[in-house]
Image (cartoon, rainbow, N blue to C red):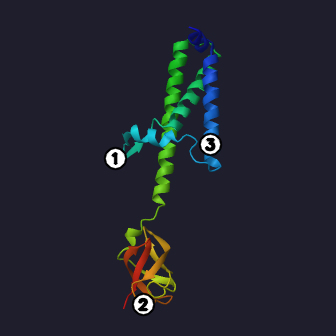
Amino acid sequence: MLLAIDFVGGNAYFYVALAFTTFFLLQGVFTFIGIGDAFEIDADFDAEIDVDVDITNGIGMTLHLFSVRGIIAFFMMFGWTGHFLTVGDINPIVVFVISFIAGTIMLFLVSLIYYFILKLSQEGTLNKQEAIGKEGTVYIPIPNRNEGIGKVQLIVSGSLQTLDAIAKDKSIKTGTEVKVLAIVNNMLEVEEIE
Protein backbone atom coordinates (compact mmCIF):
# COMPACT_ATOMS: atom_id res chain seq x y z
CA MET A 1 0.00 0.00 0.00
CA LEU A 2 2.87 2.35 0.83
CA LEU A 3 4.35 1.85 -2.68
CA ALA A 4 1.01 2.83 -4.25
CA ILE A 5 0.91 5.96 -2.09
CA ASP A 6 4.48 6.78 -3.14
CA PHE A 7 3.53 6.44 -6.81
CA VAL A 8 0.55 8.72 -6.28
CA GLY A 9 2.74 11.27 -4.52
CA GLY A 10 5.44 10.99 -7.14
CA ASN A 11 8.25 9.90 -4.82
CA ALA A 12 8.55 6.40 -6.30
CA TYR A 13 8.84 7.85 -9.80
CA PHE A 14 11.71 10.03 -8.58
CA TYR A 15 13.54 7.09 -6.97
CA VAL A 16 13.11 4.94 -10.09
CA ALA A 17 14.37 7.81 -12.27
CA LEU A 18 17.34 8.50 -10.01
CA ALA A 19 18.39 4.84 -9.78
CA PHE A 20 18.14 4.14 -13.50
CA THR A 21 19.76 7.46 -14.47
CA THR A 22 22.70 6.43 -12.29
CA PHE A 23 22.87 3.04 -14.08
CA PHE A 24 22.62 4.82 -17.44
CA LEU A 25 25.45 7.22 -16.64
CA LEU A 26 27.68 4.48 -15.21
CA GLN A 27 27.15 2.35 -18.28
CA GLY A 28 28.08 5.28 -20.52
CA VAL A 29 31.22 6.04 -18.51
CA PHE A 30 32.30 2.38 -18.52
CA THR A 31 31.79 2.15 -22.26
CA PHE A 32 33.62 5.45 -22.86
CA ILE A 33 36.71 4.53 -20.82
CA GLY A 34 36.93 1.15 -22.52
CA ILE A 35 36.02 -1.20 -19.71
CA GLY A 36 33.44 -2.66 -22.08
CA ASP A 37 29.93 -3.56 -21.15
CA ALA A 38 29.52 -3.08 -17.46
CA PHE A 39 26.51 -5.32 -17.81
CA GLU A 40 27.73 -8.54 -19.44
CA ILE A 41 24.23 -9.99 -19.31
CA ASP A 42 23.31 -7.62 -22.17
CA ALA A 43 24.68 -9.78 -25.01
CA ASP A 44 22.93 -12.93 -23.83
CA PHE A 45 19.68 -11.12 -23.16
CA ASP A 46 19.76 -9.42 -26.57
CA ALA A 47 20.08 -12.72 -28.37
CA GLU A 48 16.94 -14.13 -26.77
CA ILE A 49 14.47 -11.31 -27.39
CA ASP A 50 14.87 -9.86 -30.87
CA VAL A 51 12.06 -8.11 -32.72
CA ASP A 52 11.93 -8.01 -36.51
CA VAL A 53 10.61 -4.70 -37.79
CA ASP A 54 9.57 -4.11 -41.39
CA ILE A 55 10.14 -0.50 -42.41
CA THR A 56 7.78 1.04 -44.99
CA ASN A 57 10.32 0.87 -47.83
CA GLY A 58 10.56 -2.89 -47.42
CA ILE A 59 13.88 -3.01 -45.58
CA GLY A 60 13.70 -5.34 -42.61
CA MET A 61 15.79 -4.98 -39.49
CA THR A 62 16.19 -6.69 -36.15
CA LEU A 63 16.03 -4.55 -33.03
CA HIS A 64 17.36 -5.77 -29.72
CA LEU A 65 14.45 -4.29 -27.78
CA PHE A 66 14.76 -5.85 -24.38
CA SER A 67 18.47 -5.39 -23.85
CA VAL A 68 19.82 -4.15 -20.53
CA ARG A 69 20.50 -0.77 -22.16
CA GLY A 70 16.92 -0.58 -23.39
CA ILE A 71 15.44 -1.54 -20.04
CA ILE A 72 17.59 1.03 -18.23
CA ALA A 73 16.48 3.70 -20.74
CA PHE A 74 12.83 2.65 -20.35
CA PHE A 75 12.82 2.99 -16.57
CA MET A 76 14.85 6.19 -16.64
CA MET A 77 12.34 7.88 -18.97
CA PHE A 78 9.39 6.26 -17.17
CA GLY A 79 10.62 7.62 -13.83
CA TRP A 80 11.42 11.16 -14.97
CA THR A 81 8.18 11.51 -16.92
CA GLY A 82 6.15 10.25 -13.96
CA HIS A 83 8.02 12.49 -11.54
CA PHE A 84 7.45 15.66 -13.57
CA LEU A 85 3.80 14.83 -14.29
CA THR A 86 2.98 14.26 -10.61
CA VAL A 87 3.86 17.90 -9.89
CA GLY A 88 0.64 18.95 -11.66
CA ASP A 89 -2.90 17.89 -10.87
CA ILE A 90 -3.08 14.89 -13.18
CA ASN A 91 -4.87 11.63 -12.46
CA PRO A 92 -2.29 9.01 -11.23
CA ILE A 93 -3.53 6.48 -13.79
CA VAL A 94 -3.00 8.97 -16.62
CA VAL A 95 0.47 9.75 -15.24
CA PHE A 96 1.32 6.03 -15.23
CA VAL A 97 0.06 5.52 -18.80
CA ILE A 98 1.91 8.57 -20.17
CA SER A 99 5.07 7.51 -18.32
CA PHE A 100 4.78 4.00 -19.72
CA ILE A 101 4.37 5.35 -23.27
CA ALA A 102 7.36 7.69 -22.83
CA GLY A 103 9.46 4.79 -21.53
CA THR A 104 8.44 2.61 -24.48
CA ILE A 105 9.38 5.34 -26.95
CA MET A 106 12.79 5.63 -25.24
CA LEU A 107 13.18 1.84 -25.44
CA PHE A 108 12.64 1.97 -29.22
CA LEU A 109 14.96 4.96 -29.66
CA VAL A 110 17.83 3.28 -27.79
CA SER A 111 17.27 0.11 -29.82
CA LEU A 112 17.37 2.09 -33.07
CA ILE A 113 20.55 3.92 -32.04
CA TYR A 114 22.36 0.68 -31.24
CA TYR A 115 21.04 -0.93 -34.42
CA PHE A 116 22.51 1.85 -36.58
CA ILE A 117 25.80 1.88 -34.65
CA LEU A 118 26.09 -1.88 -35.15
CA LYS A 119 25.22 -1.51 -38.83
CA LEU A 120 27.93 1.15 -39.29
CA SER A 121 30.56 -1.01 -37.62
CA GLN A 122 29.58 -4.02 -39.74
CA GLU A 123 29.75 -2.04 -42.99
CA GLY A 124 33.29 -0.95 -42.12
CA THR A 125 34.47 -4.53 -41.76
CA LEU A 126 36.44 -5.75 -44.77
CA ASN A 127 35.70 -9.20 -46.15
CA LYS A 128 38.98 -10.27 -47.72
CA GLN A 129 37.24 -13.15 -49.53
CA GLU A 130 35.83 -10.52 -51.91
CA ALA A 131 39.41 -9.81 -53.09
CA ILE A 132 39.86 -13.28 -54.62
CA GLY A 133 40.08 -12.99 -58.41
CA LYS A 134 40.61 -9.21 -58.34
CA GLU A 135 43.60 -7.43 -59.78
CA GLY A 136 45.79 -4.87 -58.03
CA THR A 137 49.21 -3.30 -57.92
CA VAL A 138 52.16 -4.18 -55.67
CA TYR A 139 52.69 -1.32 -53.22
CA ILE A 140 55.57 -2.76 -51.16
CA PRO A 141 57.71 -5.45 -52.88
CA ILE A 142 56.68 -9.01 -52.14
CA PRO A 143 59.60 -11.38 -51.45
CA ASN A 144 59.79 -15.03 -52.54
CA ARG A 145 57.33 -17.46 -50.99
CA ASN A 146 57.94 -17.98 -47.22
CA GLU A 147 60.55 -15.17 -47.12
CA GLY A 148 58.34 -12.28 -46.05
CA ILE A 149 55.29 -10.15 -46.65
CA GLY A 150 54.64 -7.27 -49.04
CA LYS A 151 51.62 -5.07 -49.66
CA VAL A 152 49.16 -4.82 -52.52
CA GLN A 153 46.69 -2.06 -53.37
CA LEU A 154 43.35 -3.03 -54.91
CA ILE A 155 39.70 -2.11 -54.80
CA VAL A 156 37.64 -4.26 -52.43
CA SER A 157 34.08 -3.48 -51.35
CA GLY A 158 34.12 -0.27 -53.37
CA SER A 159 37.20 1.30 -51.78
CA LEU A 160 40.94 1.22 -52.32
CA GLN A 161 42.61 -1.05 -49.77
CA THR A 162 46.28 -1.69 -48.99
CA LEU A 163 46.57 -5.27 -47.76
CA ASP A 164 49.31 -7.69 -46.73
CA ALA A 165 50.28 -10.09 -49.50
CA ILE A 166 52.49 -13.08 -50.11
CA ALA A 167 53.77 -14.35 -53.46
CA LYS A 168 52.60 -17.63 -54.93
CA ASP A 169 56.21 -18.50 -55.79
CA LYS A 170 58.70 -15.80 -56.92
CA SER A 171 59.24 -12.23 -55.68
CA ILE A 172 57.27 -9.35 -57.22
CA LYS A 173 58.49 -5.74 -57.60
CA THR A 174 56.66 -2.52 -56.71
CA GLY A 175 54.27 -1.34 -59.41
CA THR A 176 53.70 -4.80 -60.86
CA GLU A 177 50.12 -5.80 -61.68
CA VAL A 178 49.01 -8.88 -59.72
CA LYS A 179 45.95 -11.11 -59.38
CA VAL A 180 44.67 -12.42 -56.04
CA LEU A 181 44.52 -16.22 -55.97
CA ALA A 182 43.53 -17.03 -52.39
CA ILE A 183 43.55 -15.93 -48.76
CA VAL A 184 46.33 -17.61 -46.76
CA ASN A 185 46.71 -16.84 -43.03
CA ASN A 186 44.62 -13.69 -43.48
CA MET A 187 46.94 -12.43 -46.27
CA LEU A 188 46.38 -12.26 -50.00
CA GLU A 189 48.23 -14.84 -52.07
CA VAL A 190 49.04 -13.16 -55.40
CA GLU A 191 50.78 -13.86 -58.66
CA GLU A 192 52.13 -11.53 -61.31
CA ILE A 193 49.89 -10.91 -64.33
CA GLU A 194 51.86 -11.62 -67.51
* Residue assigned mark 2: 170
Residue 194 position within the rendered picture, expressed as x and y whole percent measured from the top left: 36, 91
Question: Which x, y percent locates residue 186?
Answer: 44, 70
How many other residues sit within 10 Å of disc 1, few (<14), some (14-19) or many (≥20)?
few
Q: Nearer the viewer, residue 118 or 182?
A: 182
Q: Secondary structure at mark 1?
A: loop
Residue 84 visible from this viewpoint: no
* Label whose residue precedes the other's in the sequence (2 or 3): 3
Find the distance from the CA under tag 2 to the CA under tag 3. 52 Å
Horizontal side of 147 relative to 86 (left or right) equals: left
In this picture, is 114 found above or below 187? Answer: above
Question: Dot 2 lies on which element?
Answer: loop
Can you identify the residue that label 3 sits on? 28
Residue type at the position of mark 3: Gly
Disc 2 residue type (three-letter) = Lys
In percent of the image, x 47 and y 61: which residue is there? 125
Q: Position of residue 171 (x, y in %)?
A: 46, 90
Drawn side of residue 9 relative to residue 181, left or right:
right
**Which-is-in-front pick, marks 2 and 3?**
2
The numbered disc on residue 103 is none
Q: Amino acid at mark 1?
A: Gly
Q: Residue at x 63, y 12 (%)?
A: 9
Instruction: Evaluate whether residue 166 shows in this view.
Output: yes
Label 1: which residue?
A: 58
Q: Nearer the viewer, mark 1 or mark 2?
A: 2
Q: CA distance from mark 1 to mark 2?
A: 51 Å
Q: Residue furthest front?
A: 146
Image coordinates of residue 64 in percent, x first then y, are: 44, 40
